[in-house]
Amino acid sequence: YTSMIEHCFYIFTSLQQVNMPPTTPYAGKFSTSTYNNNIHLHKYHQPMEVSYGDMCYHDNSLVSGSLEALIQHLVPTVDYYPDRSYVFTFLLSSRLFLHPYELMSRLCHLCVEQHRSGDLLLDKIRIRDLAPKIVQLLTEWTETFPYDFRDERMMHCLKEMSHHLARGDEYSWRAMQQMTQRLIQRLAALGQYEEAIATLNASAAERPTALKAKQQNGHRNDVLSICDDAFILAQQLTHIELDRLSFIGPEEFIQAFGVKDPLVNHKSFFRKRKTTNLEAYVAWFNRLSYLVATEICMPVKKKHRARALEFFIDVARECYNIGNFNSLMAIISGMNMSPVSRLKKTWSKVNTDKFDILEHQMDPSSNFSNYRTALRGATQRSITAHSNQEKIVIPFFSLLIKDIYFLNEGCASRLPNGHVNFEKLWDLAKQVSEFLVWRQVMCPFERDRKILQYLVTTPVFTEDELHLASYETEGPENHLEKDSRRSLRTSLLHREHR
């Protein structure tokens, strides 16, 4: 079992270097203003040949359109290719209205039908002229939203389109084959990653009886025995953050909302929506918070608890300097858990000035205004960066999800006339495209497998175990806490005997 865990950990720590998606080429078309609450309209020049459907523009910016017209707008012709920011925006948010397979089916049908004339020679010429643009569109789809193609029907559509293009343009057919191979490799890497994460999580979920035994015997096996350098631990946390960020599909932000479009009447729509990697990343945040609390509450001696507190304050400060705001907030959350915050004797031995500064930076008041200012600063630094370290921006992920969620909930996807509200889609795309830029940064720090393995596999206390450990190290202060300790002892003892 141990060797299997080590194998899965090796896969997890090495996948960052396998078939990572390229930087989205259209990210630069969106505003870099982080979490701007104002609707930002992106310039998109209407092609002269467009004469179909209902499409509404304001100051030459697309603001709404019927779903059919928007789908048609995605289809390239011999002398037209959709703006790449439009391609990303529509592929991202179209899943609010129809399944990706349905969009792919319509897209392939329209691409085939528009050059079908009944004259075989003329059709072949039209295929040859159009094929490179079809390949380009499908390449953008497969590279930016590869997880859509875990659906066998999507892969079948790709295969059918490849056969169709082979009749008119051998170069495009070969490009399709290469694109498909890259996609298969990416999906294989995803499957390995998800299996490795599942195995690591299963290992970490084991009851921490070994930790309790070592705690009672005085044999310390804690994070400080693995790494006592705050900067190095912050670097290893950044590795984990960027590894896991890189596997989150941009579509997961949209699919997490579900579908509330009144025109979608089949109840099975997105019943099996995929948000696996997004959920795994949120679970990592929770794990890190509980790991911090465990490391602080576990030591019997007060001086060891105080040293753990001081160490994590230093780690949090280093995370802030790196631009790793997610680990920073997870560490602060762990130190603010009630089992930790009640340890008054421990806190009295700690200089909390640095902690107070960090808490101020991550203060939730005014909609996290201090944090948003810091994030804008880190984003600006990444834009002008001369090294990968300066490019690192890891947002407080739960707040990012919350912002996108409220943007989706706060604006209707459909206008009263039935049009798709494309202003909303532009804004969703702006925030998600910024995330794509952040997630593709390669971590510049050297990996320490021993530290990484400890962080992702060592067992941590549950909430009840944390409270009991806190009461055992610094006794109850009132009758309520005494009753709570007695109840926790009984409950946990009962669980161990089951």
Image (cartoon, rainbow, N blue to C red):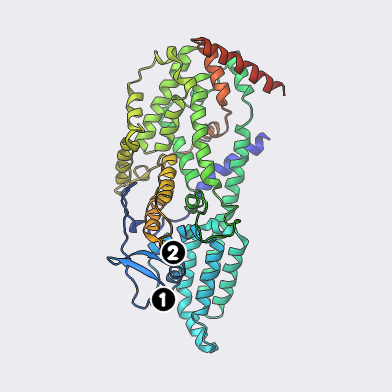
Q: Are marks 1 and 2 in contact (CB under 8 Å)?
A: no
Residue at coordinates 42% horizontally, 33% vertically from top-left?
Answer: 329
Q: Position of residue 47 (x, y in %)?
A: 35, 74
Q: Is residue 403 above or below residue 467?
A: below
Residue at coordinates 50% horizontally, 75% vertically from top-left?
Answer: 111
Element type at mark 2: loop
Query: Circle 2 sits on which residue?
Result: 418
Crowd around label 2: few <14 · some 14–19 · many ≥20 (10 Å)? some
Please state, as top left, top right, bottom left or bottom right, where the C terminus lies in the image.
Answer: top right
Looking at the image, the residue that sits furthest to the left is: 59
Going by the numbered disc 1, the residue's amino acid type is Tyr
Query: Circle 1 sits on which residue?
Result: 52
Asked if residue 463 lies left or right of residue 491, the reply is left
Please state, as top left, top right, bottom left or bottom right, where the N terminus lies in the image.
Answer: top right
Q: Quadrant of residue 30?
A: bottom left
Q: Quadrant of residue 368?
A: top left
